[in-house]
Image (cartoon, coloured by chain):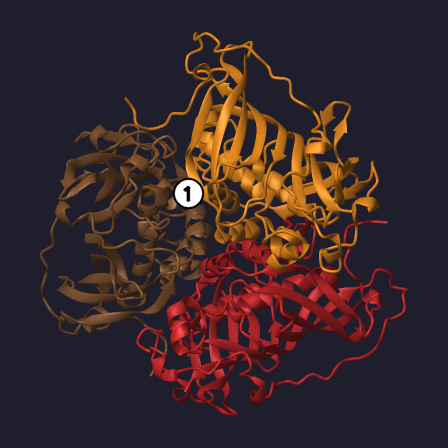
Chain colours: A red, B brown, C orange
Amino acid sequence: MSKTGAGNFFEDFRIGQVIKHATPRTITVGDVALYNGLFGPRFAVQSSDVFARAIGYPRSPVDDLLVFHIVFGKSVPDVSLNAVANLGYAAFRVLAPVYPGDTLNAVSEVIGLKENSSRKTGIVFVRTTGCRQDGGKVLEYVRWVMVRKRDEAAPAPGDHVPRLATVLDPKILSEACPPINVAAYDFAISGNKYRFGDYQVGERIDHVDGITVEEAEHMTATRLYQNTARIHFDLFGAKQGRFGRRLIYGGHVISLARALSFNGFANAFHVAAINGGRHVAPLFAGGTVFAWSEVLAKAELPGREDVGALRLRTVATCDRPCTDFPYKTGDEYDPTVLLDLDYWVLIPR
Amino acid sequence: MSKTGAGNFFEDFRIGQVIKHATPRTITVGDVALYNGLFGPRFAVQSSDVFARAIGYPRSPVDDLLVFHIVFGKSVPDVSLNAVANLGYAAFRVLAPVYPGDTLNAVSEVIGLKENSSRKTGIVFVRTTGCRQDGGKVLEYVRWVMVRKRDEAAPAPGDHVPRLATVLDPKILSEACPPINVAAYDFAISGNKYRFGDYQVGERIDHVDGITVEEAEHMTATRLYQNTARIHFDLFGAKQGRFGRRLIYGGHVISLARALSFNGFANAFHVAAINGGRHVAPLFAGGTVFAWSEVLAKAELPGREDVGALRLRTVATCDRPCTDFPYKTGDEYDPTVLLDLDYWVLIPR
Amino acid sequence: MSKTGAGNFFEDFRIGQVIKHATPRTITVGDVALYNGLFGPRFAVQSSDVFARAIGYPRSPVDDLLVFHIVFGKSVPDVSLNAVANLGYAAFRVLAPVYPGDTLNAVSEVIGLKENSSRKTGIVFVRTTGCRQDGGKVLEYVRWVMVRKRDEAAPAPGDHVPRLATVLDPKILSEACPPINVAAYDFAISGNKYRFGDYQVGERIDHVDGITVEEAEHMTATRLYQNTARIHFDLFGAKQGRFGRRLIYGGHVISLARALSFNGFANAFHVAAINGGRHVAPLFAGGTVFAWSEVLAKAELPGREDVGALRLRTVATCDRPCTDFPYKTGDEYDPTVLLDLDYWVLIPR
């Protein structure tokens, strides 16, 4: 019997199955520095302990997306090592801030299974939860992924597609955000002066800047998350595959788009939830990522006078500046679109 | 009105204008590690807490140039986003040591403005100051930069070229250096045995080693500093520009030259001041940086028996070993020269 | 007299000579994060402070190989700056765990010298020891390296080849491992369930995954270790040398192979000793590293019921998956083999 993990195939999953993932991981200021070097985020709350303390955090929290990538990375060896495609995210909620020194664990529950008509693959829906050392939940999300079968003749292990909210209720968005002392939030050094009230539903913002991605960068990021998906690291194997080259982890594009969105949303300091996300096209090294956003909705939060929520659609493109907001023609995405992300951010009122 | 920062154009500046820059930044041991990985400095004071404590620091201070890059980075979105060229530095002084855990802010004052005869651009002189969380100044320097006008017809916003010292007075060089216990400075493990008294004015030293720069490296460094100048990151845009490729942040060359200078100046542990610096030519990825230095002057420091100051000219070149000290022919720089830096370092007596 | 270090040539060494190396180095969580980003190790003891504390460590120890690389790096300017080839390692023992905050020093003793028949080079054998700030030894190993002579006519400085154990006695393997509370070792999240008793002598395991190496990655790693060997960094010089390109530090392959070996040896949390190691062929950027291992022996450790030792041969290859365990035909290595490493790891019983 092999001692190496070959990962699960479609027929290995069961509805209700719970998988504890390896490896537990203590997050440090070293991880934060490397994340900063790879993406260049500038949100003041995550950048300055002094700024964070002034408004009510004990110190700078770890970037919400770095927490996500680490939790996601743990699920790869069990959930998506035999994936053909990572299809989408939904019901993504940040439940508590994470600080350097915290240790994260991850667990996934299989909540849906649907064999494809080819019988060669099936779609696996998992709800993955990230927990702190004290057991407190810090993050949960649903993702679905198309996974190969080991044996085409194997019976489908289940047939259930879960119903998922397409938009998370704003009522639950403020769990990971402590009460903010807005009077102490220094808009003079936070990047711009715009608050909740300054954004309009329907407003579109081009984030202007572009960042080119190198092989060394995405591999370093993805290893930092202990994500083991081979397609990101193995050029020898990739040359024989459908792309002929290494594929960049989709989460890399999300982090770049988030960092770029500072130029326009400098005070949207917290990603509270992701309603849905889709990797429309793969990104390869050498591509330059641009992004734009639209304010889809605004929401006040129950009991919170300090912060409000903006629902954003952020679209990332490859080798295509976003001055004219490229998106879809009818149901067809513009061929330069990489990412279509629908999410809630919190911003001072 | 756009919520994205388009940066200031020449006509937007005013003499005496004071600009507080985003984003405040807590420096950590993570930043130090990444800086070490990108440049490979070996000065014992910055490398070993034990060594630093033995001679009088509370712990290893952060590399002076890392502090500079972070302060500089903050000024980019306000000062040089529309720059054609970064022309020079002067009156650069390190005013206090910075330790991991300190949080830096930056502010710039416009001290000079001079429209060019083409009326398409102008030169902006700013004095930028880096401050700690307690308001204490850690660094200040003047830089001047050629900035585009938004509208050629706009009147010049001022006409004043500041007078700047070409050499900083050695009297003010020791502010950021605590009293050093030279008896506890272990020359057996600091890299070489040479002290203040061992260097002669006019002495030239080839730093021997060369380091090639990759795209991933300079982009990671420059993002770490939260420097947003597009030309360093955006290959798509750069292809349509005058260089056809990404330009490496000039400060990257300064840090490489400083790290290389360890081979010859192993005990010159503190960059106290920069009299003047010029980026003679741009560096692109794939280039290999070499460097050599000349001792321009030596100075004892008032009230200090522990350390003395060496005034160095360090010249960095691209793809050109420095065994024969390439510099100028008449007024013309050798075509391989990247950097001409005139600065003061402190070294034990 | 030159103030730059030209390194020692063969005739500069003497049997019994002791060399204290520059530069002392405090290891931080920043170093650990960068190491994780560059290699992607997933051993739970090094990844999670919580996991480490549960089983008996005060916190996560620093990866044994990161400690090795830092100690090794210090020895380069004195021992191998004029090396033609790094020939081998032996008698490599980890003597104490290292934690973030510890400061390392290194010292080497020359224990053998043997001129080659060409009289152009000679082999230098050194025993290098890494020490903590309190003087406690953390690591020692012997390496031998072929070093150029400055002057072919110089007499050989000695003629002695030391006798080195080919296999380290298991009795001495547990010095750096505190007593482990195996009941608290959570095999559900450590990567797999296999313990000492589950491995058989002669068992071979393909580690499946491949990792491609980029120039930026190996240079960043090697600078992090303050290793100054020019061939890793200087493309300009390398173009004129025997390879025509930069050579990747051999230790980079060891760290990649160790990280890959998690897939099969997830609980082999500690590299206790290296019996012998050979860099069979050089690795260049763009190559994809694969690895497989064979269990050469198993040993119980005196007085230890908690952990046992596995003696492994790990073979790393370039651009060659290891499903069929490529190694040697007769005495000839398979041309894809990069590394042949014979070492002891500890694993819970």
Residue that numbered label 1 is attached to:
B40
* Left or right of C90 on screen, residue B21: left
* Left or right of C125 on screen, residue B82: left
Q: Is residue B290 visible?
A: no
Q: Nearer the viewer, residue B42 or A124?
A: B42
Pick the quarter of the image with the C terminus of chain B: top left
Q: Nearer the viewer, residue C157 or B328?
A: C157
Amino acid type, callout 1: Gly
> Whole-percent x and y of residue A138?
60, 73
Helix, strand or loop under label 1: loop
* Left or right of B211 on screen, residue C168: right
Q: Nearer the viewer, residue C297 or B58?
A: B58
* Left or right of A326 on screen, residue C311: right
> Whole-percent x and y of residue C125?
55, 21
Q: Is residue C340 visible?
A: yes
* 10 Å crowding of disc 1: few (<14), some (14-19), many (20+): many
Task: Identify the residue at horizontal 57%, vertical 35% (top origin).
Answer: C139
> How many numbered markers are drawn?
1
Pick the quarter of the image with the N terminus of chain B: bottom left
> Whole-percent x and y of residue A293?
48, 78
> Whole-percent x and y of residue A205?
42, 79
**Residue A134 drawn above or below residue C33:** below
